[in-house]
Amino acid sequence: MTVSTHVLDTAAGGPVEGMPVRLERMIVGLAGDARGWRSVTSTATDVDGRVRDLPVDGVGAWRLVFDTESRSAFFPEVVVTFVVSDPAAHHHVPLLLSPFGFSTYRGS
């Protein structure tokens, strides 16, 4: 299964090329307790503001960490945490970014 994302600058009205994006997975202990986050991979958005195939290898909590400092001095980093419950499903997690706000949603 994979996760994809698309970063759009709503103030400029277009995609954000070259934004660093990191995929992390929640580490869970034997008792089911959260133990922190482990980096799985890092990349950057392409010319269309997309990252198409981030590897997700199981259910649980995952997060995308966007290095937004070049676009927003107010939000130098955006973290989007989501849960994968169906390992066969594709998950698309877009980020809409402006200098003083952001939003996200489960895309298709």
Image (tube, grey):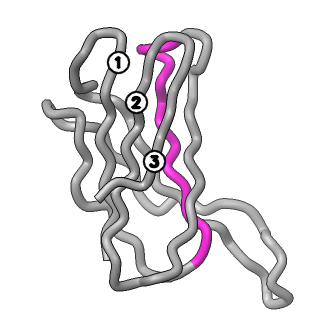
Q: Amino acid at mark 2?
A: Leu
Q: How far apart are the two marked residues, 2 and 3, measured between alpha carbons? A: 9 Å
**SS label for mark 3:** loop
Which portion, as a residue range, is magenta? 60-72
Q: Amino acid at mark 1?
A: Thr
Q: Earlier in the sequence, mark 3 or mark 1?
A: 1
Q: How far apart are the two marked residues, 3 and 1, measured between alpha carbons? A: 15 Å
Identify the residue at horizontal 66%, vertical 60% (top origin). Answer: 37
Which part of the image, by quadrant, shows the C terminus?
bottom left
Q: Are marks 1 and 2 in contact (CB under 8 Å)?
A: yes
Q: Which circle marks residue 105 in the picture? A: 3
**SS label for mark 2:** strand
Q: Label 1: how many residues lie within 10 Å, few (<14), some (14-19) or many (20+)?
A: some
Residue 105 in the image: above or below residue 55 = above
Q: Are marks 2 and 3 in contact (CB under 8 Å)?
A: no
Return the residue at label 1. 10
Identify the residue at horizontal 49%, vertical 49% (top origin). Answer: 64
Question: Quarter-wise, where is residue 77 in the image?
Answer: top right
Which part of the image, by quadrant, shows the N terminus?
bottom left
Report the side of 105 relative to 34 (left or right). Answer: left
Residue 73 in the image: above or below residue 28 = above
Return the residue at label 2. 96
Residue closest to the eye, 12 or 60 = 12
Q: Earlier in the sequence, mark 1 or mark 2?
A: 1
* Magenta-colored stretch includes residue 63: yes
The secondary structure that dominates the magenta segment is strand
Residue 47 in the image: above or below residue 23 = above
